[in-house]
């Protein structure tokens, strides 16, 4: 069941605030990779001159366009991000939530970083797999937070019914590859079984 377009809560939308806090001031062009029903695009539209959402699922793009009707500064593209011809250094802000584990991680991060203007910001939120007792223990620690937020947001819980996929990289593999590709990036593991990567491209 899906709640109103700008109201629903789940483990992914829980971290939208983190994404939005990284939008640079005076942001011109923003890009949401794997935009789903366009919820984050609509939030970004309040902070950027123009926002593009890209998703390879036609039903998601159709829904995003319907829900975003009336917003003059957004558009949506139905395409495979890794096959899409993005101009180098063309965006001030790029984000992706719960999508990059559907793609080749290295190729996706590389494409995003190339499309970012010097001084622009990149934020990725996604999932990874457990590799041992330490990962399992951290995952178990997230259960109280899960139940707390689920209860707190029970009135607005929702799911856009987007395609799902299991992560193929572990938390450690994601961190290592992210820091290799994006020197100076900040990797954080969060309680609700997500990680974040935040990076500002050097000028």
Image: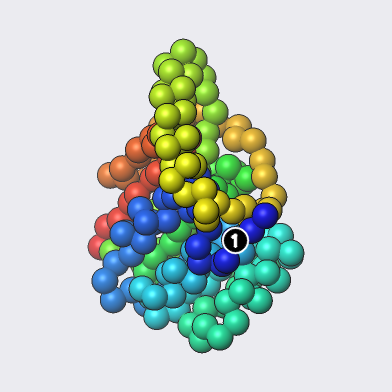
Q: Is residue 13 left or right of residue 199?
A: right
User: Is residue 16 visible to the viewer in this orientation of the structure?
Assistant: yes
Is 11 placed above or below 55 here?
above
* SS state under label 1: loop
Is 200 placed above or below 191 here?
below
* Residue at the image point whose x is 42% and y is 56% from the top: 16
* Residue at the image point whose x is 40% and y is 44% from the top: 196
Q: In the orientation shown, which residue stands out farthest toward the right? A: 59
- Residue 124 image offset from top left, x and y in percent: 44, 50
Q: In the orientation shown, which residue stands out farthest toward the top? A: 133
Name the one closer to the observer, 187 or 89: 187
Q: Which residue is mark 1?
A: 3
- Residue 168 image offset from top left, x and y in percent: 60, 32
Q: Which quadrant: the N terminus?
A: bottom right
* Residue at the image point whose x is 52% and y is 33% from the top: 128
Name the one closer to the observer, 185 or 135: 135
The answer to which quarter of the image holds residue 203 is bottom left
Name the one closer to the observer, 194 or 146: 146
What's the coloring here? rainbow
* Residue at the image point whose x is 52% and y is 53% from the top: 155
User: Is residue 106 visible to the viewer in this orientation of the structure?
Assistant: no
- Residue 120 image offset from top left, x and y in percent: 33, 64
Name the one closer to the observer, 198 or 6: 6
Q: How many circles with numbers are drawn on the protein?
A: 1
Is disc 1 surrounded by few (<14), some (14 to 19) or many (20+) residues within 10 Å? some
Is 34 placed above or below 43 here?
above
- Residue 144 image offset from top left, x and y in percent: 42, 29
């Amino acid at each position: 069941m899906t709640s109103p377009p700008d109201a629903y809560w789940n483990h992914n939308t829980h971290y939208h605030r983190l994404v939005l806090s990284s939008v640079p001031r005076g942001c011109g062009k923003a890009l949401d990779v794997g935009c789903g029903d366009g919820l984050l695009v609509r939030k970004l539209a309040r902070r950027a001159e123009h926002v593009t959402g890209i998703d390879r699922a036609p039903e998601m793009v159709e829904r995003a366009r319907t829900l975003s009707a009336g917003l003059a500064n957004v558009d949506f593209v139905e395409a495979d991000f890794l096959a899409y011809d993005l101009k180098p250094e063309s965006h001030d802000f790029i984000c992706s939530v719960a999508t990059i584990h559907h793609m080749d991680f290295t190729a996706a991060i590389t494409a995003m970083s190339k499309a970012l203007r010097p001084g622009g910001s990149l934020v990725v939120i996604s999932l990874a797999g457990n590799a041992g007792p330490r990962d399992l223990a951290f995952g178990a620690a997230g259960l109280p937070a899960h139940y707390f937020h689920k209860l707190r947001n029970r009135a607005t819980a929702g799911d856009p019914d987007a395609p799902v996929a299991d992560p193929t990289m572990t938390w450690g593999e994601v961190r290592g590859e992210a820091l290799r590709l994006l020197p100076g990036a900040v990797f954080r593991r969060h309680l609700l079984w997500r990680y974040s990567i935040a990076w500002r491209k050097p000028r």
